[in-house]
Image (spheres, coloured by chain):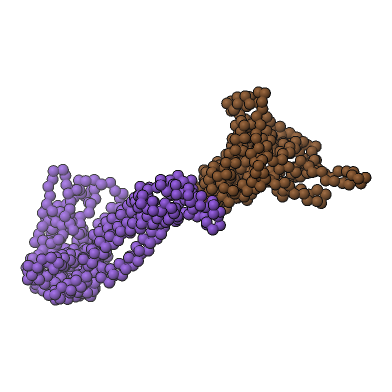
Amino acid sequence: MAVSVADAEALRPEGLLWGVRRHLARHAAWDALLFSFPTLLAFCYIAFFSYRFDRFALSILLAAGALFVIAIGALGLWRYYSTVPSLGAVARLIDERTQAENRFVTLATVDPRSSSTALWSRLRQEAVGFLRRLDVDRDFPFRLRRSFYDSLIASLALIVLFHLFIELGPWLAGRQKTVEDSAALSQQLNRVPGFEELARQIKALAAKLPDRTMTVEEKRMAIERALAQVEKQMAARPEQAGNNQELLQRTKDTLSALQDSLEKGEERGAGGGTERSSEGRGGKGEQKEGEGTKDAQQRDGQSPSKDLSESSPSRSPTAGATDSKGKGAGGRSGAGAESRGKEQDGASKADQTAGGETKLTKGQFEQNPTGGASERFLRPGEQSGPGAKDARFVIVQLPEDEVEGGSTGARKKKSLLARPPVGNLPLRRPDSPEASPEQQRMPLEYRGLIK
Amino acid sequence: MEPKKFQEIFSRIETEVKKVIVGHEDAVRKVLIAFFAGGHTLLEGVPGLGKTLLVKSLSRALALSFKRIQFTPDLMPSDIVGTQVLSESDGRRDFQFKKGPIFAQVVLADEINRATPKTQSAVLEAMEERQATIFGVTYPMESPFMVLATQNPIELEGTYPLPEAQLDRFFFKLIVLPPTPAELTEILKRTTRAELPEPAPVLAAEGARSIAEMQQLLRQVLIAPPLENYVVRLVHATQPNNHTEGGAIPEVKEYIRFGASPRGAQAIVLGAKGNALAEDRVHVSYQDIETVIYPALRHRLILNFQAEAENVGPDQILGAIIKKIPRD
């Protein structure tokens, strides 16, 4: 455009003004495009990622996409029209480049009909002389503006934030997110031929998980059935690579995560449900029979079914509070109280022995920390086995347990209170022979609060 | 008239005046611009700088009638505009109007601030209306008509500073500065020899008609709306009670009591047009505006006591305004 257009429009400076304006309008269009492009790419990436991994439903993505396209289009148009210079601004730029002393501004803005013809034609002639100094490509080169870099940085930040959200979302959303994942998985599985049965199971599972009337055992069974179905499908179609295999693997991972969450009792909602179901059934257990339970049964000579129900609170994967309350409920129902007494006996024995391990303890407190005190209580160089350090939960004796129960039960409880499990061992009083060598200065009024 | 011819005549007049006046190129050019814009000029400078000589030379170069009025405290208005005198002819006695010195094409009002306000105001009507009313009869001035007034910035005792209304009627106020050593040397050379230089009349042949054409051409010079807008913003910026965005600039707020009137904006535009024609251009540029803003506005800014106390002049404030008001 540089010389040829200038030559072509040499006789008409007004034509050059329009030519330069078109040139700058193209720059503005590129600028608007470059301003919008990174954002558009970021959105496409997020949409693709969300669709590919079923983060959002297709309808939501389509609606969001339509809205985004409209918004980005409006933004681009706004950007374009705000950067396209007016004819006066173009004339001013040409004046600056050619040092024409406002000749082009005058030509662009003064109405020739209200001006002297002689002066107007003289001005045009002068402007033609200045046109030779102008090379449009040289004088008005395209440059990437800061807005492009800003948009690029913002888009990258958006993608990073999206991934962070994806990574942290389940952690933030907790169990509800897992349930949502299960539901989404079932939808995704339902679309794959041959996975309908599995999809149905996952869907049922997703419905069961938030149901508080369901026991943990029932939930676990449902998860195990679904897992078995997944493994069956994986074994049945090992040759299928790509999406299906990946989908099955994700399903398996999700189910495993659900199972873990049930076992660990991290989900408070699930724990509450377990607690209520436990109480509603008079302290009957929800767990399957374990090795330790069998030991206890053999020792006490009780029937496996009874023992299963009695030992269930100690095997509960839920938090200690749940465990404790389950026991409390069991105590009120008679059989549970007997079982609890046995547990307490076991705990006392475990506490009294040096190793802290007895059959009863091993059976009933499989997850309970046993052995010596935490490492922080050890002297330099002293070794210890697994102890409080590896404890995954602690049992807290609530004050109401002390006032509950009859005369015999109360004594047993008091003895339990006197000797809590090692894992729950608080700091001894400094004058106690069992006191830790570590001395911690603490106001005396706080000592009474620690049990 | 062609712009080229205007520039040619303008240059010839400048050349002729420069034969007599050493230095003061800017003052000469501005006086000429004011003349072709149809305005009057106030020249301020200490005695002996050649103010009167400048005006005389100009009138001679323009081939126009010239009168000089020395303003004194006892000068009466009738001494300026004229009066009726009893005359006798054919045995009859009549009152005849005898025109005063104001009835000339170029009038030098020397030391105008020495006359009383009453006498000063006698010049007002002539300057603005280009006519004088004496005993109920209105007499038009000759065309072209220009008043060049001088005033002395020192010896203020016994003077009557021009009222704001009268100051506003002057198109430009020019400061005549003392000559540089080189200029003084040249002045000595020219004025101390036997032959004194005399300016030749430039417009003797063309006469007043060509001056009118030149004045008409000046008003046709093209000025772009963005430049007009710039003038408006500059003049508006002299108002201390400026309520537009950002408000008045600090210098204006601090030192100005009253800003420039619309006549100031008119003077800037016409002066810029004259400057453009003098530089052989048919359009106004930003540079033209910034060149004439000082003589066009310096006498229209009424400064407050603080400015006088701190010795801040209008030129300093105008400089700050030009710096702070963007062109676009």
Q: Position of residue B284 (x, y in %)?
A: 54, 47
Residue B102 falls left or right of residue A94: right
Frontmost residue, B210 versus A271: B210
Q: Position of residue A198 (x, y in %)?
A: 14, 74
Number of marks in picture: 0
Frontmost residue, B41 versus A78: B41
Q: Compared with residue A200, is residue B84 higher up or lower down, i.e. above or below?
A: above
Q: Residue lying farthest front?
A: B205
Q: Compared with residue A406, is residue B76 higher up or lower down, i.e. above or below?
A: above
Chain identifier for the purple-coloured part of the image: A
The residue depicted at 10 percent of the width and 63 percent of the height is A363
Q: Is residue A263 visible?
A: no
Q: Residue lying farthest top?
A: B193
Residue A300's quadrant in the figure? bottom left
Frontmost residue, A119 versus A320: A119
Residue B216 falls left or right of residue A337: right
The residue depicted at 33 percent of the width and 56 percent of the height is A30
Q: Compared with residue A35, is residue B293 higher up or lower down, i.e. above or below?
A: above
Q: Position of residue A161 (x, y in %)?
A: 28, 57
Residue B315's quadrant in the figure? top right
Q: Is residue B323 visible?
A: yes
Q: Position of residue A236 (x, y in %)?
A: 7, 71
The residue depicted at 12 percent of the width and 75 percent of the height is A194
The residue depicted at 9 percent of the width and 73 percent of the height is A303
Chain identifier for the brown-coloured part of the image: B
Q: Compared with residue B272, is residue A36 higher up or lower down, i.e. above or below?
A: below
Residue A320's quadrant in the figure? bottom left
Q: Residue lying farthest right?
A: B91
